[in-house]
Amino acid sequence: MNAHVNPPSVPPNAPVVALRNVHKSFGSLKVLDGVSFTVGRGEVTVLIGRSGSGKSTALRCIDRFETIDGGEIEVCGRRVDDAGLDVRALRQDVGIVFQSYNLFPHLTIEENITLAPHAVKKVPKAEARALAAKVLAQVGLEEKLHAYPEQLSGGQQQRAAIARSLAMQPKVMLFDEVTSALDPELTGEVLKVIEALAAEGMTMVLVTHEMSFARGIADQVVFMHKGKVHEAGPAGILSSPSTPELAQFVGTGF
Amino acid sequence: MGLVLDFSVVLDRWQALLDGATLTLQLAFIAVVCGAAIGVFGAIGRRGGNVLVERLCGAYVEAIRNTPLLVQIFLVYFGLSSLGLQFSAFTVAAVALTINVGAYTTEIMRAGFDSIHKGQIEAAEGLGLSRAQIYWHVIIWPGIERVYPALTSQFVLLMLASSVTSQISAEELTAVANYIQSETYRSFETYIVVALIYVALSFIMRFGFWLLGLALFPRRRRLGTPL
């Protein structure tokens, strides 16, 4: 079997996600200009930066929602930049949650959650339903099993979307500005769920504008500016930035 | 001049009218079922992937939408017989109506599939679903749900348009009417009765599609979500 299709046992100390000198342009617009960072097992990496700094694009490249023009990306032992990558296998290892929840509106919360385990991993229906109950309890929504997405608040929908990703038992979770569409109160309930996941040791990469949240949860902060990693380090860099750009970014709150 | 209407000679032939109405519904049923299947594949074909398939589906839709149904029926009728193939008028009518409604259904379904937000598809891709699974679970059913009223209208329209197949002597309702009025000389009465029967058939079809909608779209049933 091809090593990229079925990754060999990854050494325990190898990074779960590694970007090495990644370049990406949309037409003539350079979005990623030599981006490198690694995420170790159980680590939480927070990507911050202004709109247009490339942080969401970097995140999307990890799950092959964008293909890159240069450099390397390795996720769970797979080379994501490999043209022959088994994208569906990659996405079984990687969970992604979007700003706009994207729950399937015609399915109940339970059906939303059981769909992929049943269709992709061939988990029997009964087992998938048990799994749905478990992950919904994890996000505090066990009573919403049979509700439709439109019956839930934005915060609840986002938590359900997180549960849907968790049901695939990913090795790493990606969060793309998951609270940007929510008011402060609902933001809080979603962030709590993410904090609980971090406490359980889930490897995560988050793009967020919530600075105090980032400070509390991040093992590593990556500040992106004009398509480059401008400054990176432990959460402490948010309190004592060493570049004027990060100081200004943290100072203004955006 | 007083208008004197005498329906009795027309209504005496209720058995023929009932047979005609049944045949009309049968034609509509076959064309709707086959046309809906064509529509799903046609819409998927038109939405992309393969340029050749896209063009073929586009050409099919444009050919049907820009020619009269009656001409299409004659083309199938004479086309098949010039190939030496002999089919009953009913079969020819069913084939022609299917080809016709398949094109319109392709366009309506394409609109429905296109209306599914990109984020829905990305979410499904992110969960590792295959292209076929994404189509089935995330695009086809919600897409059809959105255009269901338009589909219903198109299918009722098809049933009414099937009256044109009387031109190739398919024994449907209008053909029966033509026959009755020539026999009874009560043309006005005949077509009044037939018009009312078409109204009844339309209502039956709309009711049937309403029930089908409840069965196909459980969220609508449970939440009363408008389409």
Image (tube, rainbow, N blue to C red):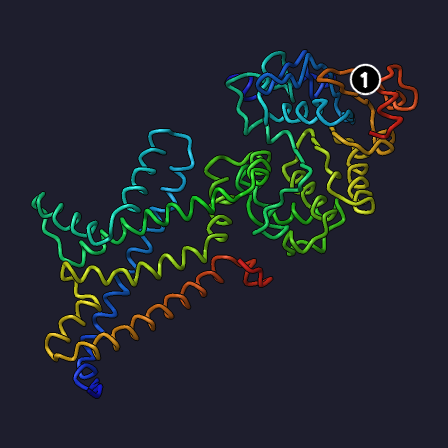
Residue A149 x %, y %: 64, 51
Please state if A3 lies on the left or on the right of B108 as rendered: right
Q: Is residue A45 visible?
A: no
Residue at numbered disc 1 = A232
Residue B12 x %, y %: 18, 84
Residue A246 x %, y %: 85, 20
Q: Is residue B204 visible?
A: yes
Q: A38 and A200: which one is in front?
A: A38
Q: Amino acid at mark 1?
A: Ala
**Quarter of the image holding residue A228?**
top right
Identify the residue at horizontal 83%, vertical 47% (top origin).
A185
Identify the residue at horizontal 41%, vertical 55% (top origin).
B151
Q: Is residue B13 above or below residue A113?
A: below
**Quarter of the image holding residue A203?**
top right
Graded by Cα atoms within 10 Å as few (under 14), some (14 to 19) or many (20 or more), the crowding at tag 1 reads many
* Element on which disc 1 rests: strand
Q: Is residue A130 above or below residue A167?
A: below
For disc 1, the chain is A
